[in-house]
Amino acid sequence: MSLDPAERFARLRLARTDRIGPVAFAQLIGRYGSALNALDALPDLVRKSGAASAPPPVETIEREIAAGEAIGARLLVLGDPDYPEMLAALDPPPPILWTRGRVDLLNQPSVAIVGARIASAGGQRIARGLAQQLGQAGHVVVSGMARGIDAAAHEGALATGTVAVLGGGVNDIYPSEHADLYARLTEQGCVVSESPVGARAQARDFPRRNRIISGLSRGVVVVEAEIRSGSLITARLAAEQGRDVFAVPGSPLDPRARGPNELLRQGAILCEGIEDIDRAFNTLRTLREPPADPMRFDGDIDDAFLDRVAALLSPTPTPRDEIARALNAPVSQVAAALLELSLTGRADLLPGGLASL
């Protein structure tokens, strides 16, 4: 069943509202049943503190939609029939996606290949060859269009199907030398972004991009990466999402091998070729399912209860179940309070039912 145009527009507007990320978005939809109802309720939710979480003007959203249409981009909203099933199963899923190219690739079996930007010739050869083998075996290859391993993976899978997830807008070509690769991706593959059309990539955008890369994929293969790198963040996110994490081993003398070797020490699956991926996928396992309960709470949250919940938060993420036990209150009531605190800037909502200051 498709969303009507008014609800699709409202979901984009809600997603673009300040301080409403994927967690708050999912809770608002669960609590009010639709984005239209959530937008109507938003002023009352933030009225107590006077915080400014006002939705962007209608004209702003109309300009974003027009910008997407001008470049032939397609908007996918959570709830659309073509919205990727693998992303919809995340807790929480990205509310909206802008796409260019073959949208059908987003609902096909996928494997991500990520790794170092300053990659060795051998590492790029491995990524390119593995991507080619995966494509021939019926897998779409997902990566981030960065230099090095990402670009090699896309090149290897262009003929069979590859998806590039960007940190900036769906038309933000970064790095600029990948203009030709980007053009081929929009023709033969698919380019995806959660950011507004025309937005330039910022550092804060890449963790969200990495979460989509792993979320679209059944497994993530890391080929060359430093210990502190975006590739290892993607691997951690994949593990949290219930995806398989693969690592290509390397020489202890090469700093770029430290990341994959550390992942292997932590229990990642050794990957020397597509046979290792096939073996893991043929093992019976179940991807993590999203919670069925939307944490609906229809009562009012008074200031005293908000203050009690806020007092239990710290910079360290705290499970809402733990807060509920400490207050002897229903989890749904705590979830509703955390949502209000997040809208007023007093809490940050995190995936997995966590919250922090």
Image: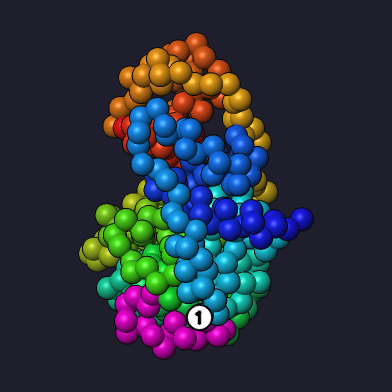
Report the side of 340 relative to 93 (left or right): left
Furthest toward the bottom, the residue is: 180
**Amino acid type shown at disc 1:** Ile
Element type at marker 1? loop
Could you say where residue 328 lies in the image, as x and y percent from the top left?
50, 11
Q: Quadrant of the N terminus?
A: bottom right
Residue 121, placed above or below residue 309: below
| One can see residue 293 in this view | yes
Q: Which colour scheme is used?
A: rainbow
Boundaries of the magenta span: 172-189
Report the side of 258 relative to 195 (left or right): left
Could you say where residue 192 lies in the image, as x and y percent from the top left?
50, 68
Could you say where residue 50 lies in the image, as x and y percent from the top left?
35, 33
Residue 344, placed above or below residue 134: above
Residue 357, placed above or below residue 25: above
Q: Which of 184 and 153 is in front in this view?
A: 184
Q: Residue at x 66, y 71 (%)?
A: 104
Furthest toward the right, the residue is: 1
Q: Nearer the viewer, residue 68 or 60?
A: 60
Image quarter for residue 202? Answer: bottom left
Magenta span has 185?
yes
Q: Residues within 10 Å of mark 1 (few under 14, many from 20)?
A: few
Residue 178, placed above or below residue 110: below
Furthest toward the top, the residue is: 328
**Which residue is labeled 1 in the image?**
71
Could you say where residue 249 lies in the image, as x and y percent from the top left?
38, 62
| One can see residue 238 in this view | no
Q: Residue at x 49, y 42 (%)?
A: 23
- Identify the main secondary structure in magenta: helix
Q: Which residue is drawn at 32% across and 56% down?
A: 204
Q: Quadrant of the C terminus?
A: top left
